[in-house]
Amino acid sequence: MEESAKSCQEELSALKKEYEDFVYIVSHDIKTPMRAISNITTWIEDDLGPDAGEDILNNFTLLKNRVGRLENMLNALLELSRVNRTEMELYEVNFPKMVEECIASLDHGVNVKFHVNYNLSNENCITLGKKLNKVVFNLLDNAVRFHNKEIKNVFVDVSENESDYEIKISDDGPGIAEEMRNKIFAIFYTVNSKDVLDSTGAGLTISSKIVEMVGGKIHYTPGINNGSIFQINWPKIISLKN
């Protein structure tokens, strides 16, 4: 029985490595012709000059945008495949500083109001800092990016219990329709059309995989007045899961 279990585990590990190598190779090999398409499109535009009609120029712009989107999706796929292979360093993280840096890195205007609250016995912890930073940034970015009101309120609440840190990131935006909630962690799924709002739809997938890897939990609940609440339970003691 033990030999059978060991054999299954070895086979699973081999399949996982094969998948990750495949994603890595395909992502890199596809990028070269994609960039060539974008470059050739630009050269044709330059050759046509002012003789090109408006419809032709619009189609060139559309083509380059589609190539750019495809490259972003490949980058996200590559990042997803390498979640448990890169940025695995443990170091001390200060929660207020980390959240402040994530907010500063966001592309947001003055119409976004952040409300941050901490209820911690110690604001520092030893953890996979870059992974935690990635998850918090992705959720903050979603809260801002998909908000539909003139004044956008985003709330960050960080507390703790005996075994983990509880991080809630919520907003007063449009929320997510009930029939779509079971899809939001799927790769490349977006609630809004990608033509309406440019997004790869990979941020929540990557965040979910990171949280699962460290032995934590992430889930969505609707806000009281619409809006969205994403809660992360990040363990104080990291137990890596393959």
Image: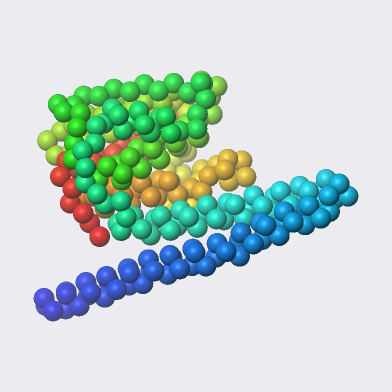
Where residue 2 sits in the image (x, y, percent)?
Answer: 11, 76
Asked whether 50 or 155 is in front, the reply is 50
Where residue 102 sits in the image (x, y, percent)?
Answer: 38, 33
Can you see residue 223?
no
Q: Residue at x 43, y 46 (%)?
A: 203
Whether residue 233 is situated above or below residue 120 in the rendered picture: below
Location of the C terminus by quadrant is bottom left
Where residue 236 sits in the image (x, y, percent)?
Answer: 17, 41
Whether residue 78 is situated above or below residue 157 in the rendered picture: below
Q: Residue at x 83, y 45 (%)?
A: 54
Where residue 111 sits in the image (x, y, percent)?
Answer: 51, 21
Q: Residue at x 50, y 58 (%)?
A: 74
Whether residue 55 is situated above or below residue 92 in the rendered picture: below
Q: Is residue 67 left or right of residue 217?
A: right
Whether residue 157 is situated above or below residue 24 in the rendered picture: above
Locate residue 1: give its quadrant: bottom left
Can you see residue 62?
yes
Locate residue 230: give its quadrant: top left
